[in-house]
Each structure stands twice: as structure tokens, then as C-alpha cells.
Amino acid sequence: MDFRPSANIARLKESATLAVAAKARALKAAGIPLLDLGQGEPDFDTPAFIREAATEALAAGATRYTATEGILPLREAIAADANRLWGPGDVSPAEVLVSNGSKQSLFNACFCCFGPGDEVLIPTPAWTSYYEMVTLARATPVPVMGDPANALKVTAPQLAEAATPQTRGLMLNSPCNPTGAVYTRDELAAILALAAERGWWVLADEIYQRISFDGPACAALEVAPTRANLIVINGVAKAYAMTGWRIGWTIAPPAVTRAMNAFQSHTTSNAAAVSQHAALAALARRDEADAAVRTMVAAFHRRRDAVLAALAPFPAVRVVHPAGAFYLYVHVGGFAGAADAGAAFATRLLEEDQVAVVPGGAFLTPDWVRASYATTEAIAVEGVTRLARRLVAG
Ligand code: PLP
């Protein structure tokens, strides 16, 4: 029988990163050594104390369903963490919903808050899935281009200008994938004030919040004038090197949390019990966790400095200052006269220099490519050096 995609996914696009990833796989399979700057996950193992906590939880019987919203001690730890940022300190575990990764948390929030006729502002470039999630909710993503002179970030006045009476919400991501840019306290405060005034939902994706190099990245809870329109999304994947465990969460007003919980109860139920116990160790055993995060962030920081030093001999190569996360966003506009310069450059770099990067078209900015330095310093430096040479050579 012919498969005709339903109206639900009629506009779903396959990830624009797939073509390069498929080529990279083919090259690897053919035995060609590849410098892979494509991946978006830490190259570290999950810290040992977290893995041990999971083993102990399994032995103690963490093998069954939990409450859809997650085990109470984990939600308590998440609320306690939030209360360290939120002045009034009134975040309660009832406002926390634990999901299968922050990706599911983001989808739950989009699906429950937005629908047909709604417009959602997306500071662009942004993580590729934001556009698709908003579209899957049958709302309309409205990309708002960031200013290249300001690390491709958007400002409150730019958002105000892009808004219409249909605007219902805003996706925020600081530190940002793909650019590595970090919003300052003032920038974030101005955007949150505007959103509160206009009654827009703010989905603040803070999955990279702890990975910041030029000082701590400001969290939305530190500067939001109210939590009434704020949905904070976070998880353990990036900061704790726990991508495979699939634990993320939302902190949202009770009515939103109840709706997302009901939705999740009919789609996936609870996140894996054993993973919840692992996440609990990451959040509750603060001293060990902080030491592990500090070590990993210090390594990302060293690599960040090393790739910037590798670029120093190539002043013509323009990058967004990488202040957080583990990405370097490189301007390749005009490369080979291609309309999609990022794709043309990524293909050439892969085929001729054996370096894999992600074309910026995936993030609605085709004049750029994303290089990840979540790999060894040697690979990151060699990869970025080849990238710069290729860009200069044309
Ligand atoms: N948000 C951003 C900006 C990301 O880059 C990613 C992963 O790449 C996610 C969310 C998803 O993370 P998780 O593994 O928690 O689903």
C-alpha cells in the first residue's frame, strides 16, 4: 500500500544535516580517517559516581513505571536548583515535569502552548528542531534574524518589530546552538520584560547554561520579571555528559505542567526509571557533580581557546565569538559562488580535507557552518585549521 504522509507531518523536513552525515559515514566505512567536527554531544563518559548510582538503583529495583511526571526526589532536586536562581524561591516540584530528554520537553511545551494560527518567534540561527516542533504543533515559526555585529543574537526591539497580533511565544536558547553566543544579563532581561508585557510564552532552552567560558551564562530565572509566562527547559545531556540517558525537564506554571503531563501520559509516560535515578545523583550530589562539570567545562574552555588560537593566522575567517556551548560558527558566505554556501563548503571540506562540519542551512543561515569542538583538542585544532585553509583557498 502506498504511504501518504498524514497532514500532521506534511510539512516535516528531514534534517538538513543528514546529507553530510551520510557522506561522512560512507567515508568512514571506506576506511578514510575523518576529523569529525559534526557531533553535538560531549565526548566524555558520564561521571563514574552517576553511573554507579544508576547501577545501585537498578539493583534496588528501579525497573518499573514511575509517575508520568517523574520521581519526587528528582523533581525536588530540580526545583531546589531553580530556587537558587529564582529570587522568591517558590518553585515547587509540582511545576516540574521530567521527560525523555529536553527535546521531548521542548516538544511537549510547543505542542501544548501553540496551535493553528499562532506565530512563534525564533531568534535565528537556532537549533534545527525548533522550527520543526513549532510546525508539528501546526503553528507558524517566525525566524527573526540575529545581528552578525552582535554575535547573531536578537534584541528585544527586533522581536517587537517581528511580532504580530498572532504572536504567542518565543524560543530562547542561551548559550546558543549553533553559534555558541551567550545573551548578557541585560539582553535577556529586556527580552523577558517584553515577552511578559506582551503575554508571550517564553520557552527558555538552557541545556548549555553551565557550559560558558567568559563568566556564568545568565539564566532566565535570574532576570524574569514573572514566571507566569515562562517555561524553562533543561536536562542532564550536555553539562553532565549524559546524552544517552534521555532525561530533560520543564519548569512551568502549574496549569501548563498539568497539561503537558496529561499529554505525556498518553504519548510516552515516564522517562526511564533508572535514568531518573542517574539524573538524581547528578543534581543532588552537588559537590561531586560540580567537580565533574568544572573539569569538563575547563576542557571545553581549553579547546575553545585552542581553536581560536588556530584561527589567529587567518584574520579573514569570520566567526561568532564562541562564549559557550561547544560550537564554533564560521561565516562561509560566497564560497564557490554557491547559493547554499554552507552546504557547498561542508561538502568540499569533507571530500577534500576529510573534515565533517554541519552546514548552516540546518539553522536557516546558509552562509555559515557549525564546527563542534566536543572532541579531542588535537582533532579540533587540526580540523579547524584545515577548515580555515580551505576557506581562504576557496
Ligand atoms: N536543545 C538544544 C539547543 C540542543 O542542541 C539539544 C541537543 O542537541 C537539545 C535541546 C536536546 O537535548 P536532549 O539530549 O536533552 O534531548
Image (tube, helix red, strand yellow):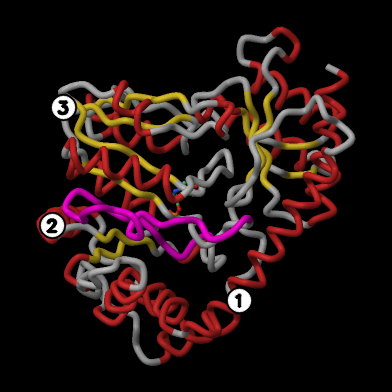
Query: Residue 46: image x %, image y %?
Result: 58, 72
Q: What is the three-letter code of the residue carrying label 3? A: Pro
Residue, far front:
186
Q: What is the three-letter code of the residue carrying label 1? A: Ala
Give the quarter of the figure containing the N terminus.
top left
Relative vertical location of residue 383 with respect to residue 389 in this rendering, above or below: below
User: Which label number is shown at residue 292?
Assistant: 1
Label 3 sits on residue: 116
Mark 1 to mark 2 CA distance (whole Å) = 35 Å
Q: Is residue 298 left or right of residue 315?
A: left
Residue depicted at x 30% and y 46%: 203
Query: Residue 337: image x %, image y %?
Result: 71, 7
Q: Secondary structure at mark 2?
A: helix
The magenta span reads: 214-238
Q: Main secondary structure of the magenta part?
A: loop
> Can you see residue 89?
yes
Q: What is the three-letter code of the residue carrying label 2? A: Ala
Front residue of this view, candidates 130 and 91: 91
Name which quarter of the figure residue 92 lies in.
bottom left
Q: Is residue 221 left or right of residue 246?
A: left
User: Which label number is shown at residue 184?
Assistant: none
Label 2 sits on residue: 262
Query: Residue 358: image x %, image y %?
Result: 63, 34
Q: Secondary structure at mark 1?
A: helix
Q: Secondary structure at mark 3?
A: loop
Marked residue nearer the N-terminal end (3 or 1) = 3
